[in-house]
Amino acid sequence: MQHLINDIDEADFDVTRGGQVEIIGWLYQYYNTEPKEVAFKKRKYAETDIPAVTQLFTPDWIVKYMVENSLGRYWINVLHARNDPRSEAEITQVYHWQYYMSESQQNEQVSLKIIDAQKELTEVKLEDITLVDAAMGSGHVLVYAFDVFLQLYESEGYSKRDATKNIIQYNLYGFDIDTRAFQLSYFALSMKARQYNRRFLTLGLRPNVFDIPEYTDLSVQDFEDLITTDQQSSDITRLLKAFHDGNSYGSLIHFTEPINFLEIESIIDVKPGEHQLSFESIELEEKKHKLKEIITVAKLLCRKYTVGVMNPPYMGSGKMNDVLSKYVKRHFTAGKADLFAAFMERLRMFVSTNGYYAMITQHAWMFLSSFEKLRQSLTQDTLINMAHLGTRAFEEIGGEVVQSTAFVLKKQNLTEYVGTYERLIDFNSQDRKETAYLAAVQDQTLGYLYRTNQANFKKIPGSPIAYWANQNILSEFQIGTNITDVAFVGLGMRTGDNKRFLRLWHEINCELFDPNSKSADITFKAVKWVPYNKGGNFRKWYGNKEYVVNWKNDGQEIKANTKRVYPQLGNNLGWKITNEPYYFKEGLTWTFISSSKFGVRFSPQGSIFDVAGSSLFTTNHKDLLYLEALLNSKAAYYILQLQNPTLNFQVINLKNIPVKYYNESKIVSIVEKLNRLSSLDWDDFENSWDFKVHPLLSHIADDNLSIWYYSVVLTNRVAKNVPIFRLWGVK
């Protein structure tokens, strides 16, 4: 505990500065540290692991950003509907919402749609405005939303005491699967209410926060003596099925068909007479109590809310247990790749028309092809604002892997809406990102603040949220020729067992190695090993030729192993032995994973390629070299970053690069020279199988060479022009 106290900033203990929720959140995170470390080592997470591995305390400034730009924005809409003449900036100054970003200037058509939608807000009362956090954790979002609601009530003439009662009763809602998180949220909101209403704890009010129930010991047969209709039986069955795994599903639980809660409640509200008391009737009453708890939560999960704000749990589909995985795939097809994406779909369901929802998530959904359907579904709404955070948005998460974005959407379709985007990815700490964001709020001419029409995203293949794309590039995507019009781009082979089938070239018998195989049609009687393009370190033009693969007898062993491991494929091995017709052809290859750079390399005839060394092929050698120049240019890297600024350079991203031809002969000539120089550079060192002599020794006269040089290359006459693998191939 002493370690924890030393690690937490003293200000986080200061209740007057919001320290109450800070300390509760940090204590909760500290409590989960050990269970999280144990769970991270597992191949898949059990239901009991989910709270620990998905819990992450949201930085205070991001909570304020999300709440002010969703709940605060909705209230400004209400004020403007009431003909309040003040601007956004003037209103936010009154409330001291320093994280509120004013919206962009809109065209007349969009402005009229916004004004028209606001007309129905004229009669909205504060008691009507609801905010939900569907994965509330220790209640950070809800506590700050309490503060904002309190400001709104006071501005409407309410006393703090009356405002507190209304906020707890009508305005705030939260759910979680972790009982301790529920308890902390309940405590935090109760203490917040007690701060402004000393009698709160005696009023009989409770915060509307809930631990999602899970009951595995209930069935519809338990209530068969009470059920009078088939509809009651059907509704109870659906409820019990959903909450049987409540601690896995959490607030993802929803029902595609409505449930008649009144009918079910009429059953459980029936009280037994005194003459009916027995062990069986007492047990039935306990089961009715459990069903009533389920109904209470289910009704709130089926409700619509004005505003949704959350930091959803992150969990890739590969880590989900079977129960959760099946549920997500069935109900959230667009977001099935990750739990945070499923919650993006779910939070959208929670929010009513013209409401707002705000989240902080990993930024992968903005770009990756696996989230394309999710992006398409979100275009039904309007992306108002985004703080693109990148790495190090959370102090406790270092490195380049976790990249985040916070954003606010409105549940209204405004196709031509010009959103505001703060590109904070180049600020390398949580504090610097906050400072940069606040600077952009004050000065909206800063270079890292972008305003763009969200309709532009559809102009780029895959519709990535590439808000920083300039107009010239967008035009090229629309009118240019794509790489797929002149080349084939694809994944290569997945051997299924790299330890068995791959080797570094210097680990094999050189007599069984052919670095210059020309065709897959060759019968490899004496050849077992052939070159294998497998990515490697960043390098342009030529090189990274280090691996070889066992392709004896046309890959007989690999294919036999694939059939054994994947019998469902039959003789169609294309899923693993992918794009075999392109094996051994000259092409371009690149490294699939890279932290910051991209470059392609020329691969002469004779190589097979895999996924990490995905490749491109043309029918014309000059076209290949021209594309090599294009793909090694800054323009290509810029376009790749528009589509997918993650660590992976996917095949689909290269396919979508537009091609513009000019001065082809000159460019091809330059590329030929670059390839030649790069190959000489690669062959100058021992990691190349074509290494002959170190460049520092190549200009020394034979009679001046040291004795160790003779021990390596034997003599100049014998070995100077012999590739190294011919000298040191091992058996």
Image (cartoon, helix red, strand yellow):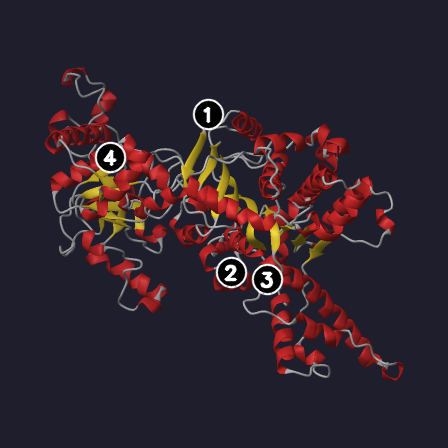
- Specify whether 687 is left or right of 283: left
C-alpha span from label 1 to label 3: 44 Å
C-alpha span from label 2 to label 4: 48 Å
Residue bearing mark 2: 328
Q: Amino acid at mark 4?
A: Ser
Which of pointers 4 and 3 lies earlier in the amino acid sequence? 3
Where in the figure is residue 708, as x and y percent of width and height? Answer: 25, 23
Which of pointers 3 and 2 lies earlier in the amino acid sequence? 3
Q: Nearer the viewer, mark 1 or mark 3?
A: 1
Residue that protrudes farthest toward the right in the picture = 274
* Frontmost residue, 15 versus 80: 80
> The N terminus is located in which quarter?
top right
Residue bearing mark 3: 253
Q: At 76% across and 34% down in the image, what residue appears?
A: 15
Q: Nearer the viewer, mark 1 or mark 4?
A: 1
* Frontmost residue, 211 versus 468: 468
Which of pointers 1 and 3 lies earlier in the amino acid sequence? 3
Q: Amino acid at mark 2?
A: Val
Which of pointers 1 and 2 lies earlier in the amino acid sequence? 2
Crowding at mark 3 (Cα within 10 Å: few <14, some 14-19, many 20+): many
Which of pointers 2 and 4 lies earlier in the amino acid sequence? 2
Q: Nearer the viewer, mark 4 or mark 3?
A: 3
Q: Amino acid at mark 3?
A: Ile
For the image, the number of numbered tags is 4
C-alpha span from label 3 to label 2: 10 Å
* Frontmost residue, 440 versus 29: 440
Answer yes or no: is residue 508 visible: no
Image position of 633 with respect to 252: above or below: above
Q: Are marks 2 and 4 in contact (CB under 8 Å)?
A: no
Residue bearing mark 1: 445
C-alpha span from label 4 to label 3: 57 Å
